[in-house]
Image: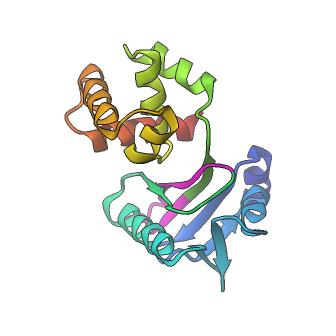
Amino acid sequence: MASAILDELDLPIILTDRNARVLLASKAAIRHFDGDGPFRLAHGTLTARYSIAAKRLQTAIMQVCDEHKARVVSLDADSKDGLPAAIVVPFKNNGEAPPCHSLVILQSYGEVSDGFVGVLRQLFPLSSREARIAAALGCGQPPSQIARTHGVSITTVRSQIASIVEKMHLKRTPELVARIARLVALI
């Protein structure tokens, strides 16, 4: 039944244990494993095509289980669809404490959707450019990728990130990324 519910969402969602062993995967997630995509299923374990990205994904899953906080993992891999990323969220199983499972939502990012940018502008006092940068950060894009996408310097992007953090009454960039990532997961 749980698999059918995941399939209805048509999102690439995977339930893993602390060691990234796949317990359940939606049909959309299984499609991500086919072909030349950045994500792999190897001997029942969620991994990535490149070893550094696989290590980053494994580390994030373990940290989510240990710290009970969602994480966005950027994968430095070439992709026609844009920068691939995974949103990793703790999943408490039958009252276990601490949770030893995680929901992993696989993403590939190119353009940030105009709809999501609009939602950010309605929720927070951000300019259009700031909302696009915030959305890109929340979707796992690093500042260097954002700078390339917008045709501006990394210094400009960092300055805009500082402005966004201030306007959203946050203290640090990781708080911004976490807040936006939670919104991405909801939308």
Judged left or right of residue 121, residue 185 is right
Above-or-below relation of 19 to 181? below
Residue 54 lies within the magenta run: no
The residue lying toward the viewer, choosing from 171 and 161, is 161
Q: Residue at x 63, y 62 (%)?
A: 14
Q: Residue at x 57, y 77 (%)?
A: 21
Judged left or right of residue 7, residue 183 is left
Give the percent coordinates (x, y) of residue 139. 50, 43
Give the percent coordinates (x, y) of residue 26. 74, 59
The magenta span reads: 81-103
Q: Residue at x 61, y 51 (%)?
A: 107
Judged left or right of residue 95, residue 16 is right
Give the percent coordinates (x, y) of residue 50. 55, 74
The answer to whether residue 97 of the structure is visible from this angle is: no
Quadrant into which the C terminus falls = top right
The answer to whether residue 96 of the structure is visible from this angle is: yes
